[in-house]
Amino acid sequence: MQKGYRGIDLFRLMAAVLVIAIHVSPLEGIWMDGDFVLTRILARIAVPFFFMASGFFFMEKYGKRDELVWNFLRKTGWIYFWVVLAYLPLNIYKGYFGAELTLPVLLKDLCFDGMFYHLWYLPASMAGMLIAWGLVRRFSFKGALLITGILYGIGLLGDSYYGLIYDMPLIRAFYDNLFLMSDYTRNGIFFAPLFLALGMRFHAVMNYGKTKKRYWNGVGLVLSLILMVAEGMVLHERNLQRHDSMYLFLPFAEYFLFGFLCTFDQRRIKNASRISLMVYLIHPMVIVGLRMTDKVLGIRLFSENPVVQFLGTIVLSFGMAWVLVEIVYLLLQRYGQKKEKTCTYRAWMELNLENLRHNVNEIKQILPEGCRFMAVIKAQAYGHGAVIVAEALNNIGVDAFAVATIEEAIELRRNAITGEILILNYTDAKRARELKRYNLIQTAVDYEHCKELNKAGIRMKVHLKIDTGMKRLGMDAGDVERIAEVFSMKNLDVCGMYTHLCVSDSLRGKDVEFTGRQEKTFYHLMEELKKKNVKIPQIHLQSSYGLLNYPDMRADYVRIGIAMYGTLSDKNDKIRSEINLLPVLALKSMVVHLISVNDGESVGYGCDYVADGDRRIAVVSIGYADGIPRSLSNQRGRVLVQGKYAPIVGRICMDQMMVDITGIEGIGVGCPVVVIGKMQEKEIKVTDFAENAETIANEILSRLGRRVIPVCR
C-alpha cells in the first residue's frame, strides 16, 4: 500500500466502468457510430489492462515463481468456482441447462467461453498465466513476448481480421476447428498471454527507471488510440470482423497506457483491485436486476434508456462491490487467517527485505559517480536465497548481478531475473550455447579458457579476469600481448575486465601497500592496452571491502557481496567509510522436545557433555545439515530462548542440537529459538556466531542449507 501505483488503481476502477459500457452500450439509439467507437474499440483496453496489471503485480511478489503461479491458479480457480455457483440461478432462468447442452459444450464453456458471457476472463487468466510464465521461464522476456505476440497474431485472424482469411479454405478450416474448442480467439491461449507477459516485462523496465516520462507515454497513448480507432472503423466498414476484441494497435495502446499510469506514483487506493474485480463479476447480475425491475414495475426506465441503465449499473455495481468486499474482508479476518502467528517450520530464516533495500541505498551513497552496483548473489545469495534476493533487488532497480556458476545464473533467468548476470568462475566451453541462450556473461579465467570459448564458435559476452597479485584465477597483468590478443578473438565480446583485491579488508600498512600495487598494476595494464589501440571495456576491482576502504577507486562497477547483507566478515574488521548496515537475515528454529538431566548424566553423541548438576535440556530442530558448524558443540556456541542466552551442550547433530535452558521459565514445545538475530533486548550477530566457530560471517551464511525455509517480511 505504500508503493506509488495510484494511477494503476484509478484506471482499474475506470476499466470496470468501461466493461459495463461494453455490456450496456449506453450510446446505442442515440449515436450508433459513437457507441461503436466507445464500446467496440476504446473500451477494449479494459480487459487487457486487467491482464497486464495481473502480470505486473505478479512480478511484485517475492517467492519462488512456480509456487506463486500455482497460488494464482488456486485463488483464481476458487473465485471462478464460487462465481459459477452464483450465476447458476441466472443460467437456469435462461434455459442454459436444456436438452441442447452436451458435455463438450459444457467443457468448452467452463474452460474457455465462461459460464456466463463475461466469465471467460477467469479461465483465460489461469491459462494465460500458465503460458506467459512458462514462456518467460523458458525463453526470458524477449522470447516470451515474441511467442505470445505470434499467438496474438493468430488470434487477430480469428477476431477482427477474420475476413482476410474467410476465402482461404485451408486456413479457414483451421479456424473452424479452433472455434469448436472456443467460440472466440479472445481467450487464454491467444489473447491473455501477451498482456500478462507484457505486464511482467513492464515491471522490470519500470524498476530500472527506463520508462519514458509522462509526456511521451501520453503522446504514445493518444497516437495508439487514434490508430486503433481508425483500424477498428476500417475493419468495421469493410465487414472483416468476426468479433471486435483484438486489434493490431491494442498492445501498443496498453503499453503506453501502463507507462502513463505509472508516472502517477502517489500512495495506492485501498481495495481498488478487489472492488474493480467485484464490479466486473457482478455487473451482469445488476443489469438483469434493473431490467427485471422494469418488468415488475411495468415501467421502461432502464430497458429502453441505455444511458440511465448505464448510470444505474455503475452506481449499484460499485455500491454492491464495496459492501461485498468489506463482508469478504471481515470473513477472512475472522475465519480465513490463522490466529497463531508463530512459524511452524522446523528451521527458518527471516529475511528483512526493507533492510536489504536500506543497505543498497547506504552503499550507493558512497559509490563513485557513474559507478554501478553489481550485486553478488552467489552461493544462494550468501545463504539468503538467490531468487528472493535477486527479485527484491530487481524491484529496486538493481540490474547487474554476479554469481559463481552457470547453474546459479540459469536459475535466476528461469525465475525471470533481468539485467546483466556475470559468472565469476570457470564454465566449460561446451556450455557456450547455454551462455548465449540465457544471455549470460562469462568470466574468461585465463588465456587457454579464452581460446576454448572462442573455438566454440558462438558469439558470447565475456569479462576478462586479470591477476594482479592474488594468484588464483586470471591472466597475468604483465602478459599484455596475450591479453590484447583476446580482444581480437572473433567470438568473444569482451565487455568487461576485472581483478580482485585480495587484502582490501585489512588496513594494516603492508596490506594497504599491497592493495595499492594491485590497483596500480591494473590501471597500468589499461594504459598498455590503449597503446595497442584496444578499446577498454567496463572495469571493476572492488568487492565490499574494496569499496568500504577504497571508495575513490575509478571503476564502472563495484561487486557488493557481504556488505549488502548487512554485516562485515569479521566483527573486528575496521573500515574507513562511515556506513550504517542492517542485518537482512535472522536464523530461527524451535524447541521440539524437553529433557530433564540429572547430575552426572551425559547428553548427545560420544557422551562428551556431562551435567554438573540437575539440568533442563531443550532439543532444537536445527543441526549441521542446516549449516550450523559442529565446532560450536559443547558450550562453544549459544542461542536465544525467551530472550535469554542458552548454551549449546553436547555434540551438534545432523538435524538437532541440544541447549541448556536451566533457569529459563516459560519454555515449551514449539517455543521459538533464535540462532542468529535479536530476541527482546539481546542479540547474536552473525559475526559473533562466526567468531565462536573460528571462521567468518561469509562462511556461516553461505553454508545455510536449502531446507532452512526463507520467510520474507
Image (tube, rainbow, N blue to C red):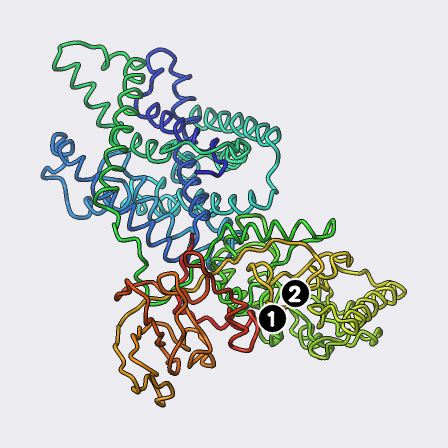
Above or below, 499 against 87 in this view is below
Residue 397's disc is: none
Image coords of residue 706 (percent x, y): 42, 69
In the image, farthest residue toward the bottom: 606
Image coords of residue 410 (percent x, y): 52, 65
Q: Which quadrant is home to the N terminus? A: top left
Three-letter amino acid code at the position of disc 1: Ala
Above or below, 392 against 620 in this view is above
Residue 587 position by quadrant: bottom left
Count of marks overlaid on the render: 2
Q: State the residue position of label 2.
A: 460
Front-most of residues 676 and 450:
676
Q: CA distance from mark 2 to mark 1?
A: 8 Å
In the image, farthest residue toward the front: 613
Tell me if label 2 and label 1 are in contact, CB under 8 Å. yes
Above or below, 607 against 303 in this view is below
Front-most of residues 509 and 84:
509
Residue 246 position by quadrant: top left
Image coords of residue 285 (percent x, y): 21, 27
Q: State the residue position of label 1.
A: 432
Three-letter amino acid code at the position of disc 2: Met
